[in-house]
Amino acid sequence: MKQIIIAIDGYSSTGKSTLAKALAKLLSYKYIDTGAMYRVVTLYALRNGFVDKQEINKAGLVSSLGEIKIAFQINEQGKSEATLNGISVESEIRGMEVSSYVSKVSVIAEVRELLVAEQQEMGKSKGIVMDGRDIASVVFPAAELKLFMTASEAIRVQRRLDEMTYNGLDVTFEAVKENIAERDYIDTHRTIAPLIQTEDALVLDNSSLSREQQLEWVLEKVKALC
Ligand code: DC
C-alpha cells in the first residue's frame, strides 16, 4: 500500500488525537501529536523561570531553545508519551498550568520554526498521521489527505473535562470551557500560522459520530488514495 501523509487540524478538544492515534495504529503509521511538542516547550518555560506575571519571557526562552530535546516514547501500557530531555512529562503537559500558557508560547516565531522543522523531518519518509493546528497549511502543505475536525462547544468541553478528570486533575466545567475558548481565540487570531481550514481539507464534524464511525469515514478516504 502507498505510504501517505495524513494531516489533521482543528480546534482544541475536537478529538483529533483520538482519531489520529487509532488511524495510525490501523495503518501501522507513525503518529505525532504536535500539540504535545508545544506543551513540552511551555513546561520547560514554566520550570525554568521564563514565565513571569503571566507573561512569557520570550528572549529568555528563545535563547534556551537549544536545551530542549523533545521526543516520544512508548510506555509499558503501549501508549505514546512525550519526553523532555529524555524524561516523560506526559502528565505534566496535560495539566491546567501548561494549558493556560501554551497558546502564548505557540505564537513565538522561533518556537514554531524549530518545531515545524522537527515535524517536517519526522514526515520525510511518509507513513505518518500528524495532528495540530498548522499541519495542512504550514508543516505539510502537500499532504495527500487533510482533515479539519470540529465539534460542538459543549461536547468539546465535556471531552477535555473527562480526559483531565480521568488523569486525576481537579477542574471544573467552567474552567475548561474558558481555557478552550481562550486557546481557540489565540490559535485562530495569531499572525504566524493561525489555525485555518485549508481549501483542500475535508471537514469532519464529529459531534454525533462514534469513534468507530469516524475511523470508518477516514479509512474510506485513505483507501481511495492508496
Ligand atoms: O492539540 P493541543 O490542544 O494539545 O495543543 C496545545 C496548543 O498548542 C494549542 O492551543 C495551540 C498549540 N499548537 C499550535 O500552535 N500548533 C500546532 N501544530 C499544535 C498545537
Image: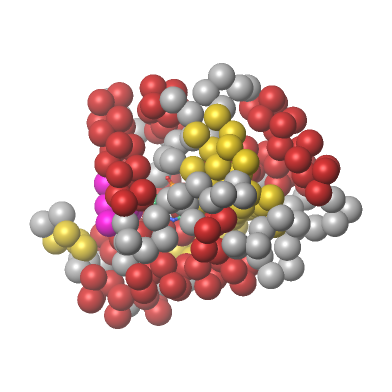
Q: Which residue lies at the image location 66% right of the left edge and 58% below the top edge?
A: 143
Residue at the right extreme of this rendering: 1
Does 155 appear above or below 199? above
Does 169 appear above or below 106? above
- Between 176 and 163, the residue placed more toward the observer is 176
Q: Which residue lies at the image location 40% right of the left edge and 44% below the top edge?
A: 94
Instruction: Report if residue 128 lies within the magenta region.
Output: no
Q: Which residue lies at the image location 77% right of the left edge and 44% below the top edge?
A: 222
Residue 118 % position (x, y)? 54, 70
Residue 91 visible in the picture: yes
- Start and end of the magenta stretch? 99-104
Residue 26 % position (x, y)? 77, 41
Does 31 appear above or below 191? above
Residue 22 occupies which quadrant of the picture?
top right
Dominant SS type (magenta): helix
- 212 vs 90, left or right, is right
Residue 44 % position (x, y)? 33, 63
Residue at the top extreme of this rendering: 208
How many numbered markers are drawn?
0
Residue 78 occupies which quadrant of the picture?
top right
- Between 93 and 178, the residue placed more toward the observer is 178
- 150 vs 201, left or right, is left
Q: Which residue lies at the image location 42% right of the left edge and 60% below the top edge?
A: 193
